[in-house]
Amino acid sequence: MYSRKRVEVYLSLTKKEINFFGQFKKPYDIQIFLNEIPYDAKPGTSSPSGVIRERKANCFEGALFGAAALRMLGHKPLIVDMIADNDDDHVVAVFKYDNFYGAIAKSNTTILRFREPVYRTLRELVMSYFDFYINTIGEKTLRSYSNPVDLSRFDNRNWMTTEENLDFIGDYLSGIRHNKILTARQIRSLSRADAGLVKLCFSNAVEEGVYKPEEK
């Protein structure tokens, strides 16, 4: 149940949208919703209200939606940007439970999604994605990650409900510092994922949204 004070904080949400967010009782409920809606391969970034209306999302939209839904559960609306080489970048919504990190994510692959809140540090959380962050030729592509970005900094642009394209948030992420996770020597020594893992990863992918890597 939402208190009057909480509703006032999110006045830009309609009653229908508030009730929609109210169905999520815990972070994994949000993940189930993102798993069930189709992956959206079209360009552009819709707000969480747009995701509710259209019932589809890409990776970035899923992270923004996850952050908004987590906010309605009392968490800060935090996202983390992961940068890859020869692959798509990935964005996740992060939260803490008993001071341990977890994550919610929408992905065109099967294994870059939810993470239980069992990771002591943000780096631990990010590294849980490393061996599964692969492109279609099996390269392990994750290279760096941002510190958490609190989306409340964009409240003046109504990021939760606007019909404006939210690519300005992506532009912000592109300009902030990212933490490297590998040395150049480590990158040169990386092995490729086996064919079985690659097949599992992309088994239900929307082809139009799959990154086409360059063979090196």
Image: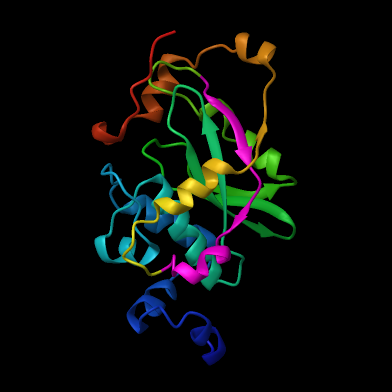
Residue 147 sits inside the magenta stretch: yes
Vertical order, 149 against 212 (above or below): below
Frontmost residue, 108 versus 212 = 212
51 vs 197, nearest the viewer:
51
Image position, residue 28 (x, y; %): 50, 58
Q: Looking at the rendering, which quadrant does residue 209 occupy? A: top left
Q: Is residue 165 magenta?
A: no
- Residue 152's spot in the image, x, y percent? 57, 66
The magenta segment: 140-160
Q: Position of residue 160 (x, y in %)?
A: 43, 67
Estimate the x, y position of residue 4 in percent, counting from the top left. 52, 91
Residue drawn at x 41%, y 79% is 12
Residue 24 falls left or right of residue 178: left
Query: In this view of the protein, can residue 162 be seen by the observer?
Result: yes
Report the side of 57 relative to 90 (left or right).
left
Nearer the observer, 123 or 87: 87
Q: Looking at the rendering, in which quadrant would you find the C terminus?
A: top left
Above or below: residue 128 compared with residue 42: above
Question: Toward which corner of the image does residue 119 lie, by quadrant?
Answer: top right
Residue 181 vertical position relative to residue 70 in the rendered view, above or below? above
Q: Residue at point 55% right, 61% down?
A: 151
Left or right of 138 in this view: 101: right
Horizontal side, residue 21 vs residue 181: left or right: left
